[in-house]
Image (cartoon, grey):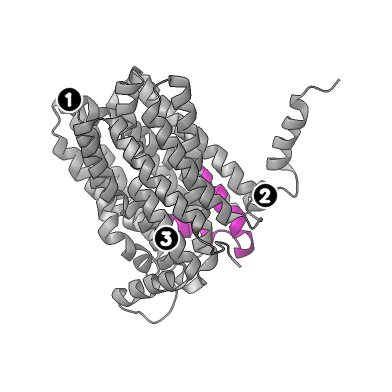
Amino acid sequence: MESESGPLNRRVFDFFFAPDSKFVRVFRHRDFRIMWMGAFLSFVGSWVQNVGQGFLVYDITQSKEKLALISFCGMVPVTFLGPFGGSIVDRLDRRKLLIWTQVLLALGAFVVFFSYLYMGRKMPIEILVVVALLGGTVSCLEMPARQLVIADTIPREDLPVAIPFQGLTFNLARVVGPAIGGILLAKVGVQACYLVNGLSFAALVLATLAIRTNLSSQKRQIEPIGDLLKEGYLYTMHEPRLKVLFYLETGVSLFALFYLVQLPALAKDILHLGTRGVGDVYTAVGVGSILALTLTAKTADLHIKGLLVRGAITAMALGLAGLALLENRIAVFGILVMLGMASVTLFNTCNSLFQLIAPERLRGRVLSMHIWALSGVGPLGVYPFGLLAEHFGLTYALGWSAGLTGALAIAAWSLRLRLESE
């Protein structure tokens, strides 16, 4: 008699390894495989550092406001410079640009590593502020460059399927990285998290050097960056689907994503977890992210992206309400999985639509509008919600976040526009 797990095991095997599977379809491209692995290893290091950074800030300051401040500093450069990123990337050699941005990001990690090594918990918080500002500024170019380099390694007909697998690098790392980060925190110390991240950037540098895809800038007449920015903004605002997606992403970034910054406080103050627990809460969100990527990859060829966007925003509102009302560890970990799944479903689906709807010549600068909605607006919500949590409690801030995100979900369902690519 065949075990119940047999059919499930076959479905998993077929999803990844059947000759006609989407996994085989995109990973048959050599340069895509190389960039995927390089990005994954780099992201693992980034998530190891994220765990260490959250623990370090809360350990030094015991302040939810300072948790929000460091995140604010890492994101606020994107608020002002993010829309320029795609326009600049469209004008430069992407290979050189991606390599130098990795070097600068590694430098920031090593600065914190050596500072903590010599000063320990007496390290001034200002060092973390400066490094966060540097990282955020560099990310304005690194994010669109990395996404477009990976997209350049795949034929356009495979792009709708490749984008969810492209996102798998970041979100699989959200499971692996925090688990490693929690172990390093408990066994070695927070400085090890920064060392691992600094070294991990070498993976993406080596991958960028190894690929054969032409990454030089397009040979066209040089236009002022202001004109390029205006062109990308106007196209986004005049294309009804992109305009709605932009506003929905902006609302979620503003109202819903602050909970990620407060995960160290959630682990310590509400769940009463130890050092390893900080990594565990990040891992729970990462598990949801993997489930989301499975969903978006399986549905990549289906015209249900509008449904995914609306459903994801609704799930985020319900999840935030659950965090505000519940303290049971099992329930909270389940909610964190749901929130990870909802947020990645939303942003990965929007990423696909921005790249598929935009014409080729505008793809970089239009994609920057998506990145700006995701990362540039966040500081305007992260820091105020952090202040709210500092003065009135984390559950109070989560309640407001749930209510505002719920209002956004209602608005999303009330729209009659079909949010699909042609």
Horizontal and vertical percent position of residue 159: 59, 59
User: Disc 2 versus disc 3: distance between alpha carbons?
Assistant: 28 Å
- Identify the residue at horizontal 34%, vertical 41% (top origin): 401
Front: mark 3 or 1 = 3
Q: Which residues are magenta?
A: 144-168
Q: Is residue 378 visible?
A: yes
Q: Let me know if residue 152 is in the magenta part.
A: yes
Label 3: how many residues lie within 10 Å, few (<14), some (14-19) or many (20+)? many
The quadrant of the rendering that contains the N terminus is: top right
Q: Amino acid at mark 3?
A: Phe
Q: Residue furthest bottom?
A: 221
* SS assignment at label 2: helix
User: Disc 2 versus disc 1: distance between alpha carbons?
Assistant: 48 Å
- Identify the residue at horizontal 34%, vertical 17% (top origin): 274
The quadrant of the rendering that contains the C terminus is: bottom right
User: Disc 3 versus disc 1: distance between alpha carbons?
Assistant: 41 Å
Q: Amino acid at mark 2?
A: Lys
Report the residue marked by disc 2.
22
| Along the viewing direction, whichever of 377 and 169 lies nearer the viewer | 377
| Along the viewing direction, whichever of 303 and 198 lies nearer the viewer | 303
Horizontal and vertical percent position of residue 163: 55, 53
Report the residue marked by disc 1.
121
Horizontal and vertical percent position of residue 207: 47, 49
- Identify the residue at horizontal 60%, vertical 57% (top origin): 160
Report the residue marked by disc 3.
246
Please say if 413 is above or below 215.
above
| Left/right of residue 391 with respect to residue 302 in the rendered view | left
The quarter holding residue 372 reads bottom left
* SS assignment at label 3: helix
State yes or no: discs 3 and 1 in contact (Cβ < 8 Å): no
Instruction: Give the mark nearest the N terminus, 2 or 1.
Output: 2
